[in-house]
Amino acid sequence: MAASFFDAFTDPKDQSGFSRIKDSSSVTHTPTNDTPQLSLEAKNQSSVYQDYLPEWKLVTDTYRAKKLALHQHMTSQLEKLCALEDKFEKMSGDFHGKVEGAYDQLSTELDGWQDILEADQDRHTHEKAVIHQVWRLQEERIKLNVGGQYFETSLSTLRRDPNSMLAAMFSGNGMISRDPDGSYFIDRDSTYFRLVLNYLRDLRIPPSVQEDSKIMEELMQEAMFYRIKGKPLEIKMGKFIKGLWKVYPVESTRTLLHFVDKDLSNLDFSGYRLDSRSCFSGCNLENSSFGSAWFIADAEHAMDFTNSFMWGTQFPALGSAQRPFGVQIRFDGAVVDEMIA
């Protein structure tokens, strides 16, 4: 933009025009024909400047005042902006802190609910299994009419001896039909049938029964009728006890062993003639061998293996010379292989 008239008098970088007018008296002019004309022009400019100087001063003062006010306003706005930024940062931090706290609390609550749900699920699974077991037991609940007297037992009890007639009757092949009242009729005297059921439940004969020869004889007949394999000889042990000694080698020496809660695992008892009063109650007999031992029969005593752990324990075959049917052994509470019992 071309310099204005006022620039010559106001521009601090170039005030040569004003200086020339102000200091014209000190300037030495070379007399020329143009000197009077230049002096007149300078006077005219100075006069014009003096005329507009108040107006120009008003313009500049107004400009400076407005500029200062605007600067102050901008400074104030910047300060407000900085304050707003600080407030936003604080509010943002508080907000994120609340969100994180709420998230942590929610996560903790969800973990708690998950634990409760898992516990409920486990309880439901257990209850379902119990209900299923009850249903299964109810389904296998059997009502028997033996000679006019009713008995209730389970299907598993009747099948306990797989070679017996009772197991065959209830094998599901239609050998026996159900009466209208839901019972199964067996044409047999019921007097001692309770003892037969109790034997199948416990696989043992109570001492009170063994001591009564008449009951033992009747029970033997019932066992023979129901074809409970091997049990008639075992039931009749009181009558044949003396004969059982004939199967033993001619030797009278017995060994009475008495152990309670001992670790006898992996031991070999071969060759021992074990007295029927021997006790191994609560012992660990895992993988021990009685396979070549001799079990001595005694009508008054029973060898005690109660509450013992007998997994993998070897025994002579039931009915063999080393373990005749007359030998009484108590396995109550013991963990045994089925082949032993």
Image (spheres, helix red, strand yellow):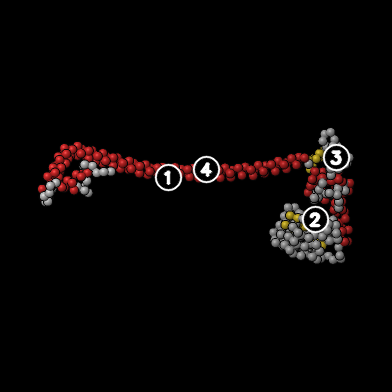
Q: What residue type is labelled 4?
A: Leu
| Secondary structure category for the residue under label 4 | helix
First along the sequence among labels 2 and 1: 1
Number of labelled discs?
Answer: 4
Which residue position holds label 4?
106
Q: In which quarter of the image is residue 92?
A: top left
Rendering quarter of residue 37:
top left
Question: Which of the pair 280/48 is nearer the observer?
Answer: 48
Q: From mark 2 to mark 3, how far is it between C-alphas? A: 31 Å
- Front disc: 3 or 1: 1
N-terminal label among 3 and 1? 1
Label 4 packing within 10 angstroms: few (<14), some (14-19), many (20+):
few
Q: Residue 26 carries which label?
A: none
Residue 222 visible in the picture:
no
Circle 3 Cα neighbour tier, 10 Å, few/some/many (<14 / 14–19 / ≥20): some
Compute the Cα span from label 2 to label 4: 58 Å
Whichever of labels 2 and 4 marks the residue nearer the N terminus, that label is 4
Q: Is residue 331 left or right of residue 35?
A: right
SS of the residue under disc 2: loop
As drawn, which residue projects farthest toward the front? 33
Residue 128 vs residue 110, the one in the foreground? 110
- Residue that numbered label 3 is attached to: 146
Q: What element carries label 1?
A: helix
Which residue is at a point 79% across and 56% down the rendered structure image?
340
- Amino acid type, residue under disc 1 in the picture: Gly
Is label 2 or label 3 in front? Answer: 2
Q: Position of residue 3 (x, y in %)?
A: 24, 44
The residue that mark 2 highlights is 339
Q: Inspect the image, locate mark 2, and give the three-letter code of the amino acid beneath it.
A: Met
* Residue wearing tag 1: 93
Place of residue 324 in the rendered image (x, y in percent of width and height, measured from the top left): 85, 58
Residue depicted at 86% across the width and 53% down the height = 230
